Image (spheres, coloured by chain):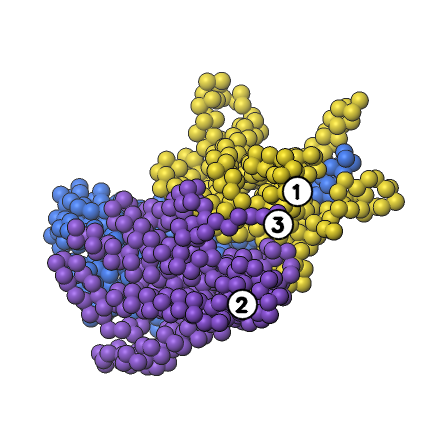
Chain colours: A purple, B blue, C yellow
Amino acid sequence: MTELVQQLINGLSLGSIYALIALGYTMVYGVLKLINFAHSEVFMMGSYFGFFTAVGLGIEHYESIGQTFPLYYAFVVLIAAMAGAALLGVTIELLAYRPLRNAPRLAPLITAIGVSLFLQNLATLIFTPNPRRYPAIIREVRYELGGVVVTNIKIAILVVAIALMAGLHLLVQKTWTGKAMRALSVNLDAARLMGVNTNRVISSTFAIGSALAAAGGILFGLDQLTIKPTMGVLTGLKAFVAAVLGGIGNIPGAAVGGLLIGVAEQLTAGYLSPDYRDAITFVILIGILLFKPEGLLGVVRPEKV
Amino acid sequence: MRRKTVVVAAAIVSLVASLAFTFGCKNGGGSQNGPGGSGGGNQTGEIVIGHYASMTGDTAHFGQDTDKAVRLAVEEVNAQGGIKGRRVKLVTLDTRGDATEAANAVTRLIDVEHVSAIIGEVASTLSLAGGRVAQRRGIPMVSPSSTNPAVTAIGNNVFRVCFIDPFQGTVMAKFARENLRLTKVAIIKDVRSDYSIGLAENFRRAFTQRGGQVVAEQSYSAGDTDFSAQLTAIRDSGAEAIFVPGYYGEVGAIAVTKQRLGINVPLLGGDGWDAPDLFRIGGAALEGSFYSNHFAPDAASDRARRFISAFQRRFGSEPTGLGALGYDAAMVLFEAMRRAQSVTPATIREGLTATRNFEGVTGRITINAQRDADKSAVVLRIRGGRAVYETTVQP
Amino acid sequence: MKWLLRAAVAAAIVGALWGLSYVLHEHVIEYVVRIAMLCGMNIILAVGLNLINGTTGQFSIGHAGFMAVGAYTTAYVCTQLAPEVAGVLGTGFLPDAVVFNVGLIAGAALAAATGVVVGVPSLRLKGDYLAIVTLGFGEIIRLLLTNAEFLGGATGFSGDNPTGLSPYTNVFWVFLWVVIVIVVIRNVTFSQTGRSLEAISEDEIAAEAMGTPTTRLKVVAFTLSAAAAGIAGGLFAHLQGSVRPDDFKFDRSIDMIVMIIVGGLGSITGAVIGGIFVGVTLELMRDLSEYRLVLYSLLLVIIMLVRPQGVLGKRELSFSRLFPKKAAKPARAAGDEKP
């Protein structure tokens, strides 16, 4: 029982990271019908931005004298990384996707793959390929409740993830930009005809999605301890599956999908075999698609000629 | 309709033929070293040696660490006047960690660069891919750090300067059973790495043979970053130590997760642990753990100390175990060239076969009949954030 | 009379390929020959994938899985089953060429069967679902192979011989299969079936309304394309000398997509060009050392920005296009631009 609870807690914290990344996939797909392969690398870069901001703020000094990194510094790290990633996301969209807006639908897919490869290899060159230990921007405290170990980091991950997702929900439901995003995802051309500045809305979509991925990147570093330039590949793939699972284009769906995949993965690893932890993600995916192709929370939109 | 098919076929045929001829006619063509065909056996000018390594991709740190040390070795030998008065030229080709590219790279080293000998790879699966080409083409290859027995079984052209999995797995089992007097041990292995699988298997065999018990066996895949499921499962198994034959990135994370979960048993491991980054990642969680290695920096021979300081001067960082092996691979190769009458692939191969008691950075190296290196292993204990010498285990 | 002509053409092609193979293996350095063979495999992969992704407009992004099925099957047949058959018939009874091609066909058949299994449920659906199912499928195949002890697990499968799988793959077999795959796919593309496939890609619902059996045709196209990937896998196995699960990672599927889109989606000649592009570019960039992947990825982005429709677009290079005087009725060349 304690083991089950333990695995669930670990699964939820991993899942909330997937969820944060999945949101970016689903938002971009919703608006542009594009699988943004570069998103996993934005996640990776966001994680590195956080790393270097923390180093710039002198975290190594705090660690060496055994002092706690001030909490507001931790927020600075988070905000800086999110801002950096948002800028990166917008730039990618501007340079690699916008010129292809009227091109065949699959052309931006190749530029997405190209940008993804580019960022990954650029990171290998600049940051070196060595895995790096993520600085402890939050000092770890362990709580033990009846054999179940919970750290404040796991709690912080959940809190930050939930706060960000709630913020996103408000943004999408209550603000003008959010309304415009929803309009674009229904029909981009119609939205443009109604006077929506589509390019600006698309840019904001990329900015928000990338910022969330960067937050995911920092939480990932805190949770998993090491980061490296190729960290985005598998994590990104799983986050994408999470987005599909929840119903691609559907924002709450991405959150649910992420949590589900995180928990399923952890339970498989713990009870079945870790050999199948990656496979389970895809098995769930195929299962869902066969029985409920629109995803868990997706809505069937009738296709018309 | 028919005609078009013929045209398509003819177009492909002529395209392939013309491309192939433009880029690589045998005897000449792209060759800068003049006639010499694929043998690389010309007796004047530079001696060209090739190194194929993962300079990019997921395992780029393996390739880059090794390549630095090989380059250092080449620079040193050239500073001493080269071999038989000839400069040594190093050509490094990237494999991206991909077996197809590894075979491409070795073929290119032989055909285009006309190398006399080849160094590479770190990963056993890539050494197998490259080694098969080297064997077929008769060019000697020295793998610095591929520990899978199958690598040198390819044939008489493939050598290595590291010990092999069965030995290393046995070393740790012997140490755990006889020195630490443990009876129950858990294992976490990397199922995507044959190195890790091999070590785990041999550890289990040797440990149970000596009366120990493996109480839990868990696994992960290289690149995984979350190990809490495996460790949670091990927590209640009663293990007195956990054998983790993986690479330092994952090992460091496993150590920290272990601490987070409140599991207070030491970790045991192999040479994949050996990197300065291990301590940066694992930190205090690694205290009291042990791993087997090729050499102990604190109990190092003069030779090893010279290498460490030269490496630090040249690259501004400490060498890793992979670096030390890369350096030894190059030095064993140069020694074999010196011994040979002339520098041809065949004589280098003979020279390598005759390597006896070579004083390397990672210990005394003797190439045995299986073309593997007979050498002892050391066990290091992690104390105060660094690895200190514990004991030596003979083969 | 007509079949006689066809037989003559076929014989001429086989003869030309045999000559090509002889000349290359005897007179050209192995490095170049090896790259040429890898390009040939890329062409098979790209032409096959193009049928489903380009002509039919259904997006598969897990074709490396079918390649893996073909590769492992061929390797298994050639190393495990062939010796047993030889044991019954007596050694020397089965020439290597027969063993190898039986292996390749078995690989293609199993890849095709897997294609049916994957395709039937997912191709009933419209939209990007095939993409996502094939993505999952490709990863699952790889993970299953990693855990399959009898196929060597993560270390890979190379038979019992320490030097690996027999090097059956040579220029002749690679390019014979290139020609076979191109001819088959070309004939399908320009047949009535091909027209229907194109109709599906233009507007699936309209095609269905016109009475086109869309699901069945999509499955046919998908299966053919899986079979082609299986052939390429088998050829790859016996060139490389071993097959590992990691040879068929997601990156490999991505490579295939790059081939068909760079060449021009929907064009067979475009797929050929794309296959050669992917096979050659990274090798030509070797001197750039660790910078080559950065530059390769930039090159991809630039190509797509400059030519979003790919090098050829939907057009085909053909005899009649190169020499318009002949005025052979172009089967399709004129219909390339959409109205």
Which residue type does callout 2 highlight? Ile
- Please tell me if label 3 and label 2 are on a single chain: no
Q: Quadrant of residue C306?
A: bottom right
User: What is the spatial separation of the Cα atoms under label 3 and label 1, in whole angstroms?
Assistant: 16 Å
- Please tell me if label 2 and label 1 are on a single chain: no
- Residue at image coords 41%, 42%: A291
Residue with the mark numbered 3? C260
Which residue type does callout 1 highlight? Glu
| Residue B262 shows in the view | yes
- Chain of residue at mark 2: A
- Chain of residue at mark 3: C
Q: Quadrant of residue B122?
A: bottom left
- Chain of residue at mark 1: C
Residue C20 picture location, percent across and down: 69, 39
Q: Nearer the viewer, residue A103 or B337?
A: A103
Dot 1: within a 10 Å radius of its alpha carbon, few (fewer than 14), some, or many (20 or more) residues? many
Residue B52 picture location, percent across and down: 48, 56
CB atoms of marks 2 and 1 within 8 Å: no
Residue with the mark numbered 1? C198
User: What is the spatial separation of the Cα atoms under label 2 and label 1, in whole angstroms?
Assistant: 32 Å
